[in-house]
Amino acid sequence: MNIRFDEKGLVPAIVQDVETKEVLTLAYMNEESLTKTIETGETWFYSRSRQELWHKGATSGNTQSVGSVKYDCDQDAVLVLVEPKGPACHTGAVSCFTEGVTERNSSLADYQILQSLEKLIIEREKERPEGAYTTYLFEKGVDKILKKVGEEASEVIIAAKNRDQEELKWEAADLLYHLQVLLVEQGLPFKEVLKTLEERHKR
């Protein structure tokens, strides 16, 4: 990469979730930290206050696996697409950008729960903790899961017919959960469904 570092040898680095596309943080890199990021596959930055390199997640465990590194048309800023292993912000928030001066649209963080839910269901499928409802569904098998998806879909229809938004909210959440369980059971990542929606949207 032919990056144009500033007079202090730094370049701003925007870190973005590779799946949700939410901007997680803005940090700075020098040539060494950028090289380490590319070579190790995890994010490294340069601290302007401490004047030293730092490896994201080295102490907290909240590392960021790098999917790709891009630079802008002026080559004076980089965009790092990552798969976060935990919160990006030192406050424990998913993103450092949590407060909005104006919010005309819902934040992508609102949809982060879908990704978190999928990860939890995958863990439940592998570990099968005793007493967990998700464990029960996986142990009963696909027929039970399909039955629950059908039941919840019917409940959504009834709630909608009744014009009951409170009931609809709860039933829709139940349907999304059971659909996620079904997708995990079938080995189909939720992002593949999202890709299909995106492809249809582009037509």
Image: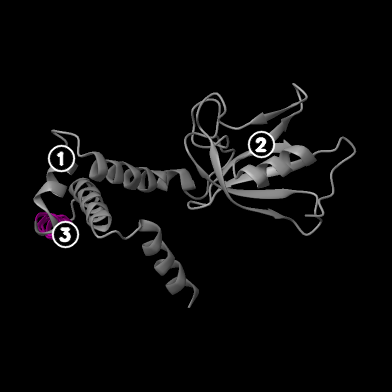
Q: CA distance from mark 2 to mark 3?
A: 45 Å
At mark 3, the secondary structure is helix
Percent coordinates x, y for residue 59 in the rendering:
55, 23
Q: Is residue 172 left or right of residue 27?
A: left
Query: Residue 112 at what x, y percent from top left?
Result: 42, 45
C-alpha span from label 2 to label 1: 39 Å
- Give residue 133's mark: 1
Q: Quadrant of residue 133?
A: top left
Residue 132 visible in image: yes
2 and 1 marks in contact (CB < 8 Å): no
Residue 146 within the segment the image draws in magenta: yes
Which residue is at the front of the view, 95 or 138?
138
Three-letter amino acid code at the position of disc 2: Trp
Picture colour scheme: one colour
Q: Residue at position x 40%, y 58% from top?
A: 191
Magenta-colored stretch includes residue 134:
no
What residue appears at the point 23 percent right and 52 percent down from the top-left corner? 181
Res. 56 image quadrant: top right
For disc 3, the marked residue is 153
Q: For the residue labelled by badge 2, is the local secondary structure a helix, a strand or a loop? A: strand
Is there CB contact under 8 Å for labels 3 and 1? no
Q: Quadrant of residue 73?
A: bottom right
Discs 2/1, front? 2
Residue that label 2 marks: 44
Point out the residue furthest to the right here: 7
Observer able to see residue 30: no
Whichever of labels 3 and 1 marks the residue nearer the N terminus, that label is 1
Local secondary structure at mark 1 = helix
Q: CA distance from mark 3 to mark 1?
A: 19 Å
